[in-house]
């Protein structure tokens, strides 16, 4: 009987410890209400979150910034818990990342539109591009598709029906100028612009290379683009107070004024759209 009592006591104690363990684990998923770690890509996203951090500090939220030089690592770091939030991507890219990596990252607040532009060191308009011109575009699926979407919207090419935002170069069904598409690393396209007749460049990389989208592009993405950027978190944290505080700071009048003054139309606040 003593042995039976001992066994029952051990089982009961184990059950209590497991319950406590589950409780503790649940608590660790909630973000600190007073500090948040935010990942961004270098350039406009970095500058804007720095401005948002100043607003957040006034409301008792400390923002620690981590800056990345590519598009994949901020999501990897977020999914692994090294970040609490990131701010750098549009929803088609996020959806593709979740599909490819089995992650559950969710958009929680609109930020900005970085209108992708087409640039050329040789030609002053898309009409000037000769037959068979070489055209550089990002080699990642979402931004490559975005570049093709812009070309179709401008009447330069036609894409297969149903492939608008997810198109690849293999989905081009009409190409009157016989453009030769060359897929390149998005971050390197500004350095390789002289090697092609024209190229589509993401705004953060264009600005980083001293290229002004509004003034220097020969074609600029329209403001009705589906590629608005978002603040992104792990699904378990989407209703956390720290996240709400950060969104409020980002979408403040102070940050909107900073964007409009700093970027003069090259970056567009999109949370009121």
Image (spheres, grey):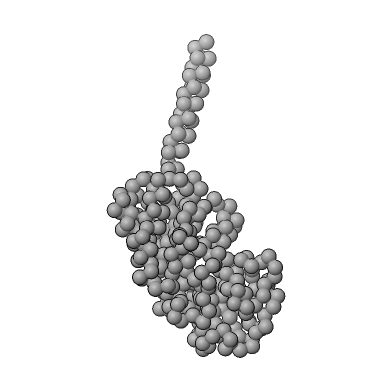
The residue under the point 65% across, 84% down is: 177
Q: Nearer the viewer, residue 33 or 25?
A: 33
Farthest residue, direction front: 273
Whether residue 186 can be seen here? no
Farthest residue, direction top: 1
The residue under the point 33% across, 47% down is: 34
109 relative to 265, above or below: above
Q: Nearer the viewer, residue 86 or 102?
A: 86
Question: Left or right of 67: which side holds 122?
Answer: right
Residue 67: x, y in percent? 40, 62
186 relative to 121, above or below: above
263 relative to 10, above or below: below
| Figure disc tally | 0
Q: Nearer the viewer, residue 234 or 219?
A: 219
Residue 82: x, y in percent? 43, 52
Farthest residue, direction left: 58
Q: Quadrant of residue 154?
A: bottom right
189 relative to 238, above or below: below
Q: Quadrant of residue 265?
A: bottom left
Question: Left or right of 70: which side holds 171?
Answer: right
The residue under the point 51% across, 48% down is: 235
Residue 184: x, y in percent? 55, 75
The residue under the point 58% across, 59% down is: 96
Residue 69: x, y in percent? 44, 66
Whether residue 177 can be seen here? yes
């Amino acid at each position: 009987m003593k042995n039976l009592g001992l066994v029952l006591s051990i089982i009961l104690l184990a059950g209590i410890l497991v319950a406590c363990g589950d409780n503790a684990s649940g608590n660790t998923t909630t973000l600190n209400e007073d500090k948040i770690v935010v990942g961004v890509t270098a350039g406009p996203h970095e500058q804007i979150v720095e401005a948002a951090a100043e607003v957040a500090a006034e409301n008792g939220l400390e923002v620690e910034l981590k800056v990345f030089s590519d598009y994949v690592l901020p999501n990897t770091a977020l999914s692994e818990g090294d970040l609490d939030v990131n701010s750098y991507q549009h929803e088609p890219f996020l959806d593709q990342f979740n599909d490819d990596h089995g992650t559950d990252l969710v958009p929680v607040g609109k930020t900005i539109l970085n209108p992708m532009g087409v640039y050329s060191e040789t030609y002053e308009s898309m009409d000037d591009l000769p037959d068979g011109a070489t055209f550089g575009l990002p080699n990642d699926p979402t931004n490559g598709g975005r570049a093709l979407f812009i070309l179709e919207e401008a009447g330069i090419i036609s894409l297969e029906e149903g492939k608008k935002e997810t198109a690849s170069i293999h989905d081009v069904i009409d190409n009157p100028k016989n453009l030769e598409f060359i897929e390149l690393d998005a971050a390197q396209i500004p350095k390789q612009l002289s090697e092609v007749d024209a190229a589509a460049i993401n705004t953060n990389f264009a600005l980083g290379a001293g290229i002004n989208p509004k003034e220097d592009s020969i074609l600029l993405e329209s403001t009705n683009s589906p590629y608005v950027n978002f603040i992104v978190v792990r699904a378990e944290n989407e209703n956390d107070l720290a996240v709400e505080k950060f969104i409020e700071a980002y979408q403040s009048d102070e940050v909107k004024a900073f964007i409009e003054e700093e970027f003069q139309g090259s970056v567009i606040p999109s949370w009121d759209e």
